[in-house]
Image (cartoon, rainbow, N blue to C red):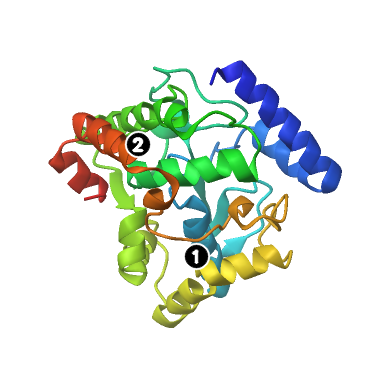
Amino acid sequence: MNRALFLLRNLTDKIKNVLSNPKLLIHYIKQYLLKDNLSNIDYYLIVSYPKSGRTWLREILVRYLDSIDKLNDSKQPLNINFSVNGVQKLIVFYHHYGEWAPMPKKKGYCKIDSKIKEAKRIIFLSRSPKSVLASSWHHLTSREKIYKRSKLEFVNDKNLGIHKITEFYNFWLKFANDNESISFLSYEQLHKDTYFFMKSLISNFGIELNNKKLIESIQYSSFHNMQKRELSGNGRPPWNSSPNNSKNSLKTRRGLVDSSNEVFNNDILNLISKETDKALNQEDKRRLGIM
């Protein structure tokens, strides 16, 4: 799918959403038109490809920081503004080369920009490519009515498919070889032991640990609870509800570790596996946490 067509369908979809929910206009303006103001502030960067668990991770962090009275108001809807010992800090979420909004980045765009250079610490949040593709398919065909071709074409799409994901992963694996400030965390690891990996993450951010409140924050942020709040219109803005009353269009859809076998047939799954193995060796997968 070419980038111009993606942009046209994306904007059309957003206009429909704003007509049904005018409050979304402010979010879209902030997301597409306003740049993060990161001057004169320490910030941590969480980098991920879309559909890698960012919404879930953010929900836990916001709930926890709020519960220990460290959360500050933020005019940037995706970032988290908090304080440590009276010093203001930010957690900035960044899709970098993987970004879809308002359209996918050009192939070969991967580069080290100022947002990456100036981050105090970087967490790279990964997820198995087949799971990313399955979740992306639902997002771009159900939540946002953007992609209208076949599943096989989607997997092979140069701007959205398997090669885009593995190129993104390889770029960050290589960059991390010479950068000790980068740590890897995967969606699969968070599912396996949410408490252990969240405890490690908040330590990386210099945030105090309160075991009881962290456990409560994890429970509050379960996919079941997040989906209930979204369906009732009480989710965290701007994802208050499904745009078309379909469960596949929810921001918090199911929270499965991997639903790829429900989305793709065996031939497509074998293709994804083959291309993943060509691009990422066992050590790469181990570092990413997607073994």
| Closer to us: 265 or 135 | 265
Q: Residue at x 35, y 71 (%)?
A: 195
| Closer to us: 88 or 201 | 201
Residue type of the residue flagged with mark 2: Ile
Q: Which mark is residue 268?
A: 2
Q: Quadrant of residue 176?
A: top left
Say which element carries label 2: helix
Residue type of the residue flagged with mark 1: Ile
Where residue 48 sits in the image (x, y, percent)? 42, 42
**Alpha-carbon neighbours of circle 2 within 10 Å: few (<14), some, or many (≥20)?**
some
| Closer to us: 84 or 286 | 286
**Alpha-carbon neighbours of circle 1 within 10 Å: few (<14), some, or many (≥20)?**
many
**Above or below 158: residue 181:** below
Query: Does residue 223 appear in the picture of this structure?
Result: yes
Q: Which mark is residue 98?
A: none
Q: Quadrant of residue 100?
A: top right
Where residue 282 sits in the image (x, y, percent)? 14, 42
Q: Residue at x 79, y 38 (%)?
A: 16
Where residue 124 sits in the image (x, y, percent)? 35, 44
Q: Residue at x 31, y 31 (%)?
A: 166
N-terminal of the pair, mark 2 or mark 1, is: 1
User: In screen coordinates, is 247 left or right of 156?
Assistant: right
**Above or below 11: residue 57:** below
User: In screen coordinates, is 119 left or right of 142?
Assistant: left
Say which element carries label 1: helix
Q: Are marks 2 and 1 in contact (CB under 8 Å)?
A: no
User: In screen coordinates, is 168 left or right of 38?
Assistant: left
Q: Which residue is mark 1?
A: 60
**Above or below 190: residue 9:** above
In three-dimensional space, the C-alpha distance between marks 2 and 1, rounded to whole angstroms, equals 34 Å
